[in-house]
Every structure is written in C-alpha cells, then in structure tokens.
C-alpha cells in the first residue's frame, strides 16, 4: 500500500433512508464498525472513517465528495442511484433474523383490491418510497401498478397500515420484517397481501466511482468477508444487526436505467 493512498482517510457513507436512527445514535456504532473493518482488512488505524446520513438527499450529497469511496446502503437506494453514482458492489450484508435477501410485500385493505387496475389513484407508502424505480421494477416486476399511483416515502409504516385498514385509498410496500409483523397487529385481519417481490438483497457495501485502488478494494473485501469470524467482529457487527458479509450476488437487472 503506497503512502499517498493512506495519507487521507477513506470514508464509508452509511445511508438508510426511511429507517429509524439519528446520526448521534448511529455514529458511535459506525465508528466501532469501521475500526473493526480496518483491522480485519489490515489497513492502518485511522485510515477508514464513517459518516451516517439518514436522508436520501444527504446521502447523495455526501457520496459526491472525493473522500467518499464506499457506500453502505439498502438495496432500494442502490437500485435507484447505483448507475448515477457509479457504485460497484463489494459485499452484501447478512442481517440477523433476515439473511442476505428478503421479499417485499404489497399490502392493501382485505377485499378491496381485486386487480392492479383497481388501485388507480391510490397512494403507495413505503420506507422505499424514495426509490420509485425500485418499487415498480424490482419489488413489483410482475405487477402492473397503475401509472397514476403516487409513490411516497414514509417511516411511519404503522400509521400507513392503520390508514389502509380504515379504508383510505392507500397501499403499502413492506420489507420482510414489517411484513412478518402483520400477524401481530390487532387489525391484521383487515389487511391483505396482494403480491410479493422476488428475493432481493437487503443491503450492500459498494465502491464509489473507482475511488479505491484495486489492491485496497481487494483487501477491504477480504476483511469484510472475514469480519464475522474475527475476534472483534461480532461486537462490531451486532449493534448494526449484522451477522457478517457475503460475496455479492445481485439480480441481473439491479440498477435503474
């Protein structure tokens, strides 16, 4: 590793729009994580830093900076912005209680939506609502969602489900954990799953615009893949609800045009 390549720290930008958690809560966990990753990758101490932004706009802005060589993002973010940001998958996350892939579920009021056409004029609410191309092309590839359905980002999924049960012209696209929780809701019997997505990755770490040399990217990848079994790995991974990382196996059509 040459001295110029380690003079300035490499930054990993963690961006998860729609999911709870502020920078003050997340940053210490990410600092612990990046320190463990650097150690596992045999990078010098302090050569890998992290920054957290919970918003789509903030994440996009931060990823434009020259030091932002890595992105840790949910798959909907990658699908929507991967081509624009020149993201190249490095590893996929293996999440506790979820795994490496998940299915997204489209939910409506029971008995209300017979066909996709019956959803004309509806609003679709989802934590992935900031990524409309993901919603239509990756989460609902075989479901002809009407063109006038308004796709809106929300972190208030429980409120969205209550609106659906009350009969509002609303549908919701849920990630796997949210869908699994439907059975626990007192009004769950008033909800109906219309369709589910094919398995798609949950989250991934990607290289940004070739800002790492091939040698550094390779050492980092090996360090991430080995992190789950490293001495410091479980303590750094568990707070992020991760078991570890696996080599990327993305769907063939995994970015918006």
Image: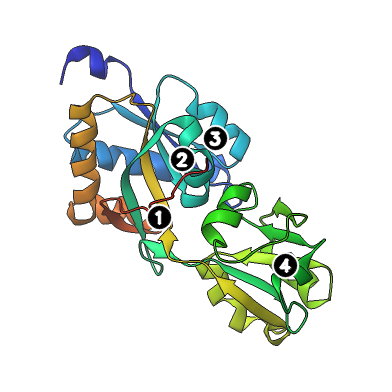
Q: Nearer the viewer, residue 140 or 65?
A: 140
Badge 1 is on which residue? 239
- Can residue 32 be seen here? The reply is no
Report the Cα–Cα distance between label 2 and label 4.
Answer: 28 Å
Q: Residues within 10 Å of mark 3 (few under 14, many from 20)?
A: many
For mark 3, give the secondary structure: helix
| Residue 149 left/right relative to 105 | right
> Image quadrant of residue 249?
bottom left
In the image, which is nearer the foreground, mark 3 or mark 1?
Answer: 3
Q: Is residue 38 above or below residue 200?
A: above
Query: Does the residue at mark 2 contact the one at mark 4 (Cβ under 8 Å)?
Result: no
In the image, which is nearer the foreground, mark 1 or mark 4?
Answer: 4
Q: Position of residue 252 (x, y in %)?
A: 38, 52
Report the Cα–Cα distance between label 2 and label 1.
Answer: 14 Å
Q: Is residue 115 above or below residue 244?
A: below
Residue at the spot 54% in from the left edge and 64% down from the top edge: 175
Any mark on residue 171, and which?
A: 4
Residue at the spot 15% in from the left edge and 21% down from the top edge: 1
Query: Does the residue at mark 3 contact the one at mark 1 (Cβ under 8 Å)?
Result: no
The mark tally for this picture is: 4
Query: Does the residue at mark 1 contact the one at mark 4 (Cβ under 8 Å)?
Result: no
| Residue 230 left/right relative to 161 | left
> Image quadrant of residue 162?
bottom right
* Comes first in the chain, label 1 or label 4: 4
Q: Nearer the viewer, residue 57 or 145?
A: 145
Query: Does the residue at mark 3 contact the one at mark 2 (Cβ under 8 Å)?
Result: no
* Comes first in the chain, label 2 or label 1: 2
Residue at the spot 64% in from the left edge and 47% down from the top edge: 130
In the image, which is nearer the foreground, mark 2 or mark 1?
Answer: 2
Badge 3 is on which residue? 59
């Amino acid at each position: 590793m040459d001295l110029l390549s380690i003079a300035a720290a490499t930054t990993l930008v963690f961006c998860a729009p729609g999911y709870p958690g502020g920078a003050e809560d997340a940053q210490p966990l990410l600092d612990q994580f990046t320190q463990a990753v650097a150690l596992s990758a045999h990078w010098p101490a302090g050569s890998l830093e992290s920054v957290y932004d919970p918003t789509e706009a903030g994440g996009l802005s931060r990823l434009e900076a020259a030091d932002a060589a890595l992105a840790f993002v949910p798959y909907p973010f990658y699908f929507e912005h991967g081509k624009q940001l020149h993201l190249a998958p490095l590893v996929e996350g293996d999440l506790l209680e979820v795994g490496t892939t998940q299915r997204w579920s489209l939910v409506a009021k029971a008995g209300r939506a017979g066909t996709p056409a019956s959803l004309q004029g509806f609003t679709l609410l989802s934590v992935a609502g900031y990524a409309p191309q993901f919603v239509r092309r990756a989460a609902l590839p075989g479901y002809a969602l009407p063109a006038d359905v308004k796709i809106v980002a929300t972190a208030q999924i429980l409120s969205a489900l209550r609106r659906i049960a009350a009969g509002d012209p609303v549908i919701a696209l849920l990630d796997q954990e949210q869908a699994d929780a439907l059975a626990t809701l007192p009004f769950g019997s008033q909800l109906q799953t219309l369709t589910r997505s094919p398995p798609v990755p949950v989250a991934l770490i990607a290289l940004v615009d070739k800002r790492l040399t091939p040698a550094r990217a390779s050492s980092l990848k090996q360090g991430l893949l080995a992190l789950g079994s490293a001495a410091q790995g479980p303590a750094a991974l568990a707070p992020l609800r991760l078991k570890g990382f696996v080599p990327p196996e993305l769907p063939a059509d995994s970015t918006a045009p």
